[in-house]
Amino acid sequence: MTSIRRWLLGWLIFGTVAASAVAGYAIFHTARREASELFDYELRTVALSLPSNLSGAGSGERREPDLGDLADDRIVIEIWERGGQLIYHSARAPVFARLPQGFNTVQRGDYHWRTFGVEQKERYVQVAQPVSVREDLALQLALHTLWPLGVLLPVTVVLVLLVVARGLAPIGSLSRALATRSIDSLEPLRLDGTVPVEIRPLVEALNDLLQRLHTASQAQRTFIADAAHELRSPLAALKLQLQAASRDGSLTGEGQAFERVEHRVNRIIHLVQQLLALAREDAQPVTSMVPVSLRRIGEQVVSDFSLLAEMREIDLGLECESARAPNDAYTVLAEPHSMSVLLGNLINNAIRHTPPGGRVDVVLRRAGERVGFEVVDSGSGIPEEERERVFDRFYRGEGSKGEGSGLGLAIVARIAGRHQLALSLRNNAGRPGLSVAVSGLRAHDADASAPAAG
């Protein structure tokens, strides 16, 4: 996969290193050439600055000229008088033949020497220096000229890394903003002053795509909601007509046939109601959190399902644990209708899967600043291998009984996800039944002793 970052860094660093290498090569050789010219100038300066009374060739007692630091450069000095007799020669140095005036390069033994000769009034002066010494000194000078480049190169590489990272940061921010969005978040991306001009067309194209996806998603949700609403009314009317016909005797046929028709109509009505609830939850991607009494919602939902529980001979009740006061409202920040639908689906699911004579308990709990609840039944529970799939839409386990549509727990998971709640299922330990726990609701204790409007 092609990476813009790697491509930019690769070529920029390669170009920087290559340019530095060419510049270093040129600087090095230029410095060596200029150093050689400097050493030639040094030889000429020594030859012209020697005192006129310097003499004593081969004698043990003589006065050596003070050359300062130049003495370390192994400079050999030779002086001939006008008649051609050598009158001065440096101690412990090879003797050279008299060479023509100017600069010359000669070989003596295994070494090459650079010489300079000049004709003066009463004498001929010749100075020489080993080429190896000149090259060593020139190399040192050339290397000294390269150290700024050696420091500049890593600094430039680091600067390239920082500049590229800074330049590509808006793309990384855009990627993180899209990756952290929820599946329902289709709002357009913000176009502020921090968005570079080069990325603005991409952001505008993404916003256009998000807008089209939002329109299509909204149309789909509206269609599902309208379809569920339109189906619910005629099915309810059909059930009323069947009940009226059964009472006045206008419906003829066997009683079992009528019961089967009514059973199927009830199941279709329940399915449509679940579809309508699911469509409403899908159509509300943004949850408006308000203070709501979880205790009041629990009492209302338990009351709504008490008749169904009584018909099935099931003991349905509400319990409050860790209450801060006898009339603790368990006030939380949530969306009231969604909480009613969530708890209603859990209770309905528990009742439908609990045999006659069983028990369904709704337990409210506090845990510090968090509030949750649990629905515990005495039914058959859920096998371990099916627990991950029971939240899928229209999924019903192999041993499922009753008139369920397979949407109840899917709606519960959808609401819990919008409220960022933890949802867990476990079979009861030591006894039959299932426990569904919902936790993570943030307590709102501004008026914990009085029920909030639900």
Image (cartoon, rainbow, N blue to C red):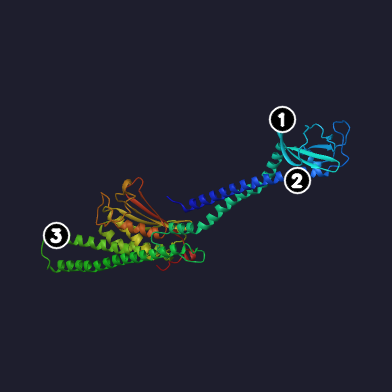
Residue at figure coordinates x 24%, y 63% from the top left: 269
| Distance from Cα at disc 3 to Cα at disc 2 | 125 Å
Query: Dot 1 surroundings within 10 Å: few (below 14), some, or many (20 or more)?
Result: few
Packing grade of label 2 (10 A; few <14, some 14-19, many >=20) is few
Element carrying mark 2:
helix
Q: Up-down: is 78 above or below 450?
A: above
Residue linked to disc 1:
109
- Determine the residue positioned at 41% across, 69% down: 453
Q: Secondary structure at mark 1?
A: loop
Which label's residue is closer to the chain start, 2 or 1?
Answer: 2
Measured in 3D between alpha carbons, the distance from the residue under mark 2 to the one under mark 1, in whole angstroms, is 25 Å
Q: Which residue is the site of mark 3?
A: 257
The reply to whether the C-beta atoms of the residues labelled 3 and 2 are less than 8 Å apart is no
Q: Amino acid at mark 1?
A: Gly
Residue 181 appears at what percent x and percent y? 43, 59
Kindly report the distance in space between the C-alpha atoms of the residues bearing marks 1 and 3. Answer: 128 Å
- Residue 329 shows up from this direction: no
Q: Name the N-terminal-most of marks 3 and 2.
A: 2
* Residue 7 seen in the current view: yes
Q: Are marks 1 and 3 in contact (CB under 8 Å)?
A: no
Task: Provide the secondary structure element on which disc 3 rests.
Answer: helix
Please name which of the two marks, 3 or 2, marks the residue nearer to the observer.
2
Of the pair 350 and 342, the residue shown nearer to us: 342
Looking at the rendering, in which quadrant would you find the C terminus? Answer: bottom left
Question: Can you tell which mark lies on residue 56?
Answer: none
Q: Position of residue 303 (x, y in %)?
A: 33, 63
Disc on res. 41: 2
Viewer-proximal residue among 17 and 237:
17
Side (left or right) of 213 relative to 167: left
Three-letter amino acid code at disc 3? Ala
What amino acid is labelled 2 in the image?
Tyr
